[in-house]
Structure formats: structure tokens, C-alpha cells
Amino acid sequence: MSAQPQSGAGRFTGRWRELRRDPRFAWAAVLALALLLVALPFLTDWIAGRTWVRIAAFALLYIMLALGLNIVVGYAGLLDLGYVAFFAVGAYFYALLASPHFDLHLPFWLLLPAGAGVACMFGVLLGAPTLKLRGDYLAIVTLGFGEIIRIFLLNLNAPVNITNGPQGVNLIDPIHLGDLSLAQAHAVLGLELPAVYNYYYLFLLLTLAVIFVSMRLEDSRIGRAWAAIREDEVAAAAMGINTRNVKLLAFAMGASFGGVSGGLFAGFQGFVSPESFTIIESIMILCMVVLGGMGHIPGVIVGAVLLVVLPEALRYLGPLQSLVFGRVLADPADLRLLVFGLALILVMLLRPSGLWPSALRRRELAAAGGRA
């Protein structure tokens, strides 16, 4: 019998699979993405204004945060609801040692890795008492840890003023790379780079470094140990994996990424306060990981970008109502949160494994659906 001719969709799918296997296509895609990321501030400023360049910089910060939490939740399967505590530790470490608060102005190149190290130690402090906890119990303990850190920051202004309490720390030194201040505009190759562009490119470089480290961890012996613990901790221990040390390492590595992001946040904003590190921030970072696809780096990046950009885009619901109806029918702030919540619910119903899950996760869900 002669083979039936393929449909248009079948031919397209086959052609797409061939292209994906072609290394030239992969390199071309990487080059196109690199050019887009370099040109993004200019394109965004031209199309939507400089405010959106700042939003793009924040999206890169949250990508780093989400990738850090992905190590704990996605790789090791440990539910952490207090991740914002490490973000706060990194931010306050930078703020207190690079501001008039203690009259210390230490350099950025020293503060950023030191802040990551301090956050790493806090990660071990959180992980050590929770090694035997799983699931809901671990979530409750980590939630409490995040609130304890925030309350400490809120109240450590008496009898000795350490954190300046609810007023926060202001006049934080902007990030300097040697004699180059990122808070000032600079001309490069005849192009004027405003301050927000400088921060965007620094955050982009550090985000790429975090992505590289995450990829290497995922493919390493440690990454396979985390995956084994996530699937079955008892079986992993029976196979000779030191579950205590491996879980502590997951908390420490994830916390260090949060510390780096916190230091960058403090230098970028010039002001930090306890109100920036509430439980809602932890929930949002967790949503980025779950929505994008737990344990899958591209999915986590997509989730982080979406949850940073979507709330800001929904701010235009007020002007849109005026344009369509001639007046504002519903409060834009309430409507924005309502639409945002509905969008998250729909995505979770239609894509329970995330917007871009890993191939392994897709197979696991398909197998579970088949057994059901």
C-alpha cells in the first residue's frame, strides 16, 4: 500500500522537528535572542516609554528570584513560602553597609557576594531545623521564618537602631562599577545610555550568569540527587544519597540567589523598607515558578516575565474603560487584581503543569492521567 500524504499540519510539525535538530537553527535563534535583549531597552523606550524599561529591569530581578526558588521547589521538591526573607537579607545587608545609616559606603563588588554569602547562611539556618518536615508542615515553618525576618526588620530600631524600623533605609549608594556610576547617563559608541539602561544591562548579565549556574546544577550530580529526593526521599536515602546535606545545599543555593537579587534591588531603588518584603512577595515568586513550570528553567523565566508584566499592563484598564464607555465603570485597581486572579486560575485549569513544563513533567502528568 502506498503511504498516505501528510496533512499541512503534519508537514509543518515534521519540518519544525527537523529545524530544532539543526545546530545552525539553534545558533541562529540564540543570536536573534541576544540581539533582541540588547536592543530591548531602546525598543521599549521608543514604543511604551522609559517606565517600561524600568519594568524590564525588575523582570530580570524577579527571574533571578524565581530561579533561586526553583532550586528549592522545582529541583528538590521542598515547598518554601518564606523565600522573600532571603531577598530581604540581601537588600538590607547592602543598604546598611552602603548608606549614611552606619556611615559606611562599601563597594558594590564586595557587598554583592558578601550579601549572597549572608543569605546563604540564613538559608542553612532555615533548612537545618526543617530537614524532617515535608509538604504542608514545611510550608508553615518557612512561612513563619519569612514573617520573623520581616518583623525583626520592622522592630530592630530600639534600643539600638539597626534597621531604622518601619521608616526603612534611604539614601542608599547607587551601584558603582569602579569609577562608573550606573545612576548617571553615559555615552557608549555614540549612544546615550540613561541610568535605567545601565541597570538593565547589569541585571541582564547577572541573570544570564544565574541561568548558567542553574543549568549546570540541574545537569550535575547534585541536581540528580535533588530530583531523587523530590521523587522519593526514602528511596534516595536507600541509594546512598546524603539527604540532609543535599537538602541543606538546596536551601543555601536558593537563598544565595535571593541575596544577590536583594542587593541589586537595594542599589537600584535607593531605598528599602520592611513593606517591600511581605508574604505576598513570597507567594508571587512561588506563582512564577508554578505558573511557568516547576523545575524547567525556560518555563520559570516565562512565568516570572508574565507575572511582572501582566499586572503593569492591566493598569491600562482604566483608560481603556474611558475609551470604550466614555467613563470609568469599575475601579481600575480592583479590576486589575480581579483580571489578574482570573488569568492565573484559567492558566492553572488549562495548563496544570505550567505554561512551559519540562518534557519529564509532561510525561509524568500524561501517565498519571492515563492511570486515572
Image (cartoon, grey):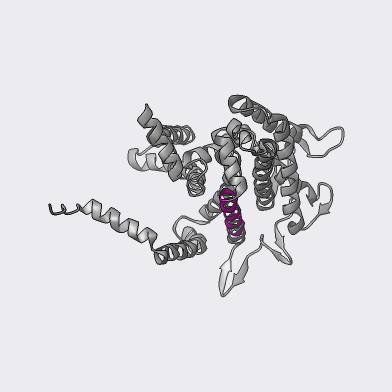
Quarter of the image for residue 228 reads top right
Quarter of the image for residue 201 reads bottom right
Inspect the magenta stretch and tell me whether residue 207 lies in it. Answer: yes
Where is 343 relative to 106, above or below? Answer: above
Inspect the magenta stretch and tell me whether residue 213 lies in it. Answer: yes
Please tell me which residue lies in front, 310 or 34.
34
**Residue 272 place in picture, x, y as percent:** 70, 43
Q: What stretch is highlighted in magenta?
A: 205-219
Quadrant of the image containing the C terminus: top left
**Residue 172 place in picture, x, y as percent:** 74, 51
What is the number of callouts on the image? 0
* Residue appearing at x 59%, y 46% in the figure: 223
Extreme-right residue of the structure? 159
Quarter of the image for residue 286 reads top right
* Residue appearing at x 54%, y 35% in the figure: 231
**Residue 139 place in picture, x, y as percent:** 61, 28
Can residue 42 be seen here? The reply is yes
Please tell me which residue lies in front, 58 or 18.
18
**Residue 99 place in picture, x, y as percent:** 78, 51
Left or right, 337 with respect to 326, comes to right
Can residue 343 be seen here? The reply is no
